[in-house]
Image (cartoon, rainbow, N blue to C red):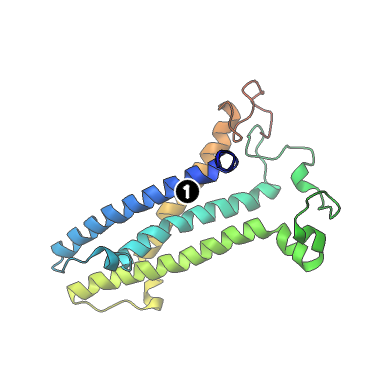
Amino acid sequence: MKTYFRNNGLCICFLILFAGTLIGQTLFGFKEHNKELISEGGKIINLSSYLLSGHFIESTFENWESEFLQMGLFVVFTIFLKQKGSSESKKMNQKEEVDRKPDPKRKNAPWPVKKGGFILTLYKHSLSAALLLLFFISLIIHFYGSLKDENEKLLLEGKQLETISSYLQNSRFWFESFQNWQSEFLSVFAIVILSIYLRQIGSSQSKPVDAPNMETGA
């Protein structure tokens, strides 16, 4: 068990943090949504109903969507874009291990490498494809939750409900998306630039402490 935690500590830590913050979001979102319902003349709902509400679905997948977009684009852009001095960039004028052609004879090579052909072609782009697919799935569910939440509010107010086509032109959905996208792009910009001049000993996201500022790559 000790070896398992040592080998998977990073994933386990972030999974625990994810679960804890999701629980916190759910409990406080549940209370906040009921406050809104009361103020708008509606009836309070129980926790199980809240988990199916537009308020919970929208707020959850709105955040996931921006995370997957940021990671997917970062993976793709770092293929051909570089930043001199950053630990988050490939080196400026030389090929790296990640650029080498897959060798099916390499010891313990993944099975798609040994299979070759179309399977290998898919596998070579599987990371970016998976992240961008998760982005589009989250975007669709975010849209569904946002539309549902909007219509729940309109129903309480006795107003005409939004359709899918009309809500695509609604400023609320796009405001929710862009406010999250911009924060993710800012965070990537920050780590790319700050890793040029700042260090964190022991972190794979930092250059060695004694590395020159303009040395590129971790």
- Residue 195 image point, x, y percent: 58, 32
Q: Name the quadrant of the C terminus.
A: top right
Quarter-of-image position of residue 91: top right
Decide: is 47 above or below 181. below
Decide: is 183 above or below 40. above
Quarter-of-image position of residue 58: bottom left
- Residue 25 image point, x, y percent: 33, 52
The residue that appears at 53% across and 52% down in the rendered structure is: 70
Task: Return the residue nearer the eye: 163 or 15.
Answer: 15
The residue lying furthest to the right in this view is 105
Task: Return the residue nearer the eye: 11 or 185.
Answer: 11
Task: Return the residue nearer the eye: 36 or 168.
Answer: 36
Horizontal side of 79 relative to 68 (left or right) equals right
Quarter-of-image position of residue 48: bottom left
Q: Amino acid at mark 1?
A: Leu
The residue that appears at 50% across and 66% down in the rendered structure is: 137
Q: Is residue 170 visible?
A: no
Horizontal side of 115 relative to 4 (left or right) equals right
How many neighbours does mark 1 have within 10 angstroms: few (below 14), some (14-19), or many (20 or more)? few
Decide: is 84 above or below 61. above
Q: Name the quadrant of the N terminus.
A: top right
The residue that appears at 82% across and 48% down in the rendered structure is: 107
Tag 1 residue: 15
Regarding mark 1 in the picture, which secondary structure is present there? helix
Q: Is residue 154 visible?
A: yes
The residue that appears at 70% across and 48% down in the rendered structure is: 80
- Residue 150 image point, x, y percent: 29, 69
- Residue 26 image point, x, y percent: 31, 56
